[in-house]
Image (cartoon, rainbow, N blue to C red):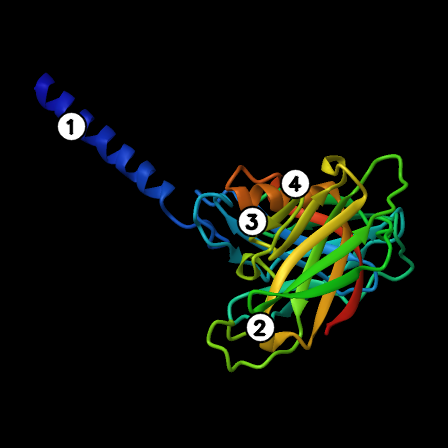
Amino acid sequence: MKGKFIHIFNVTILVFLILILHSCEVDLSNTIRATDSKIWVNAIVGVNDTVRIYIGNTSGLNSGDKAQYRNDAVVKLRVNQGLEKNLKYRIDPKSPYRGYYYTRRLENSAEGDTLRFISWIPDSDFDTVKGETIIPAPPLFSDPVLKSSYENGSILNSLDINLKDSSDIKGFYEINLRSLNYSDINSEMPTKVEDISLLNDLKLPYGLTWNEKLNSILIDYRDLETDSLHINFRVKNNYSKINLSFIIKKVTKEYYDYFKALDGGSVVNSNIVNGSGIFAGYSKYSKEIKIK
């Protein structure tokens, strides 16, 4: 009799444990599984540009999981100590499965302003996420000078830039070079607008780093041996008469650290409280240069 009672008791405990373990696998009320423990944020903000904040949930940016984009968050943005603005949700027209929270531009804002955002997903188990950044001052530099010479069946281009960053804390930069028009006759060229990259035998001096995630050049001013930058790249001879888009951005340290780590496969440097990702600012200058 005693043995039968112990057997019944053990079976009861076993059933109870099975029920508990099963309940751990059930989706939460907001359709997020218990293992999806963080909010993921991606926001790069500049003056006079549309503010876009992408929000999703994922178990980790380096886990190989894809972010699950959310359309049910509340997002508020504040410039300096001003009133908070509620951001609207919009579907990304270039993507069938994601959208972003946006405002068309930052009213009454300028370089040097501090931006703060706060976001949460109602009726979820996620914590409220926060981010803070600044909009850096515009990049200071001389107009880029492009010199070209014919060599071994292609045009060798040398782009010279002189930075003039006079701030006490030297800054971080991104340089993007892109050809705006070309004939698609040559099969060696890509079938889309071409980014100037290693495809063009790009040569960078010490202190400049090519970033695959951005398809552009990252610069930490502290690494430069001189304020003069020399960037060499090649263009096929029959593509010599093209317009080159030159964009230089002054970016925040968070921007630089995030993409530097992301491209290197390191742990992502996140500045999001209670989440993962990036909230960073930039200011930019752009110019078209004709390759003769």
Q: Where is mark 4, residue-wise?
A: 257
Q: CA distance from mark 4 to mark 2?
A: 27 Å
Q: Is there CB contact under 8 Å for labels 1 and 3?
A: no
- Residue 205 in percent (x, y) is at 67, 45
- Depth check: give the residue in front, 275 or 164: 164
Say which of marks 1 and 3 sits in front. Answer: 3
Q: Badge 1: few (under 14), some or many (20 or more) residues near its Cα, within 10 Å?
A: few
**Which of marks 3 and 1 precedes in the sequence?**
1
Q: Which residue is mark 2?
A: 94
Question: Is any atom of residue 117 visible in this view?
Answer: no
Alpha-carbon neighbours of circle 3 within 10 Å: few (<14), some, or many (≥20)?
few
Give residue 23's mark: none
Residue 208: image x %, image y %? 67, 45
* Placement of the C terminus among the 4 image quadrants: bottom right
Q: Is residue 11 left or right of residue 28?
A: left
Q: Secondary structure at mark 2?
A: loop
Of the image marks 2 and 3, the number of the one nearer the N terminus: 2
Q: Quadrant of the N terminus?
A: top left
Q: Residue at x 61, y 75 (%)?
A: 239
Dot 1 or dot 4: first in sequence order is 1
Label 2 environment density (alpha carbons within 10 Å; few <14, some 14–19, many ≥20): few
* Cα gap from disc 4 to disc 3, whole angstroms: 30 Å
- Snapshot quadrant of residue 84: bottom right
Task: Give the alpha-carbon distance from disc 2 to disc 3, as whole Å.
Answer: 28 Å
Where 93 sits versus 114, above or below? Answer: below
Q: Which residue is mark 3?
A: 124
Labels 1 and 4 touching (C-beta < 8 A) = no
Tell me the mark number nearer the camera, choosing from 1 and 4. 4
* Residue at disc 3, secondary structure: loop
At 28% from the left and 33% from the top, the residue drawn is 17
Q: Give the side of residue 111 with respect to residue 65, left or right.
A: right
Q: Residue furthest top?
A: 2
